[in-house]
Image: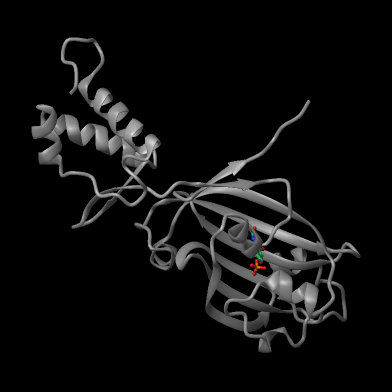
Amino acid sequence: MLNKHIPIPLYYQLKEKLSAAILSGELPPGALLPSERELSDHYSISRMTVRQALGEMVKEGLLVREQGKGTFVAEPKFNQGLLKLTSFSEDMRNRGLKPDSKILAIYVQDATPAVAAELRLEAVGINQQVIVFERVRLADNKPMAYEISHLPLHRFPELEQESLHSTSLYNLLEEKYGLVIRYARQTMEVGLSRPAESDILGIPAGSAVLKIERTTFDADDEPIEYVKSVYRGDRYKLYAELHR
Ligand code: 16G
């Protein structure tokens, strides 16, 4: 029960109780919470107080609201390491999840000036076209990220024919094309999902997302991929080990 005789607000006490139940596993990921009315009856507090506690927990990413269905315990976030160059497939397998992709589109187009600069296609005589892969990345069949990869056509003229369903791009480049993927430069920024991205990722429009841009280089220091990704903010947190 909540204690009305101590100077700790009731909504805060309820939050603490629910958070402790989530942490202990008593309320596991995906569990449906009792309704606002049930919680207010059970704890003898107003529905406003319940709403405040749940609202804050939704904002903090501990709970998710699904319209018409109720409030659920959120899936835990993944720690995404910042120091190793890994593929999505490797990341998911390391977490014991099955990686997969849904291909939304594969096409060849002229590189925009920004993409041409990233992939160093500006030199005279180089084919300025890129192969573009638009993929939804899935973990255990749930959407995690949306990626648009651009690869220089002159390096991979046959790549457009490859079936990338359930296949790792990095694996294909390494195994079939004998490429050595050496390092990448990456920026990450916080953003809000656009309506189309929200539909693809199955999240409400305007949700917090992580926007990542990466240029990947081979052993000769040549750029081989420029990717723009939108990662679900409710499933990822960044992790780094810092030394001094
Ligand atoms: C990661 C990379 C992406 C790369 C993909 C390869 C980021 C932001 N993106 O998702 O650039 O194309 O891995 O994954 O990290 P795959 O080998 O499983 O296709």
Q: Nearer the viewer, residue 132 or 47?
A: 47
Quadrant of the image occupied by residue 200: bottom left
Q: Nearer the viewer, residue 227 or 98?
A: 98
- Residue found at x 18% / y 33%: 50
What count of labels does the image hold?
Answer: 0
Residue 153 vertical position relative to residue 112 in the rendered view, above or below: below
User: Residue 62 location in percent, x, y?
Assistant: 37, 41
Q: Nearer the viewer, residue 105 or 6?
A: 6
Q: Tell me if 90 is positioned left or right of 191 in this view.
A: right
Q: Tell me if 77 is positioned left or right of 225 in this view.
A: left
The C terminus lies in quadrant? top right
- Residue found at x 54% / y 80%: 105
Residue 230 vertical position relative to residue 77 in the rendered view, above or below: below
User: Residue 167 location in percent, x, y?
Assistant: 63, 76
Q: Tell me if 41 is positioned left or right of 188 in this view.
A: left
Q: Tell me if 120 is positioned left or right of 203 in this view.
A: right
User: Residue 44 location in percent, x, y?
Assistant: 9, 27
- Residue found at x 65% / y 46%: 81
Query: Colour scheme in the image?
Result: one colour
User: Residue 183 location in percent, x, y?
Assistant: 80, 56
Residue 211 vertical position relative to residue 155 in the rendered view, above or below: above
Q: Nearer the viewer, residue 149 or 116?
A: 149
- Residue found at x 35% / y 31%: 20
The N terminus lies in quadrant? top left
Residue 53 vertical position relative to residue 4 in the rendered view, above or below: below
Tell me the quadrant of ligand 1: bottom right
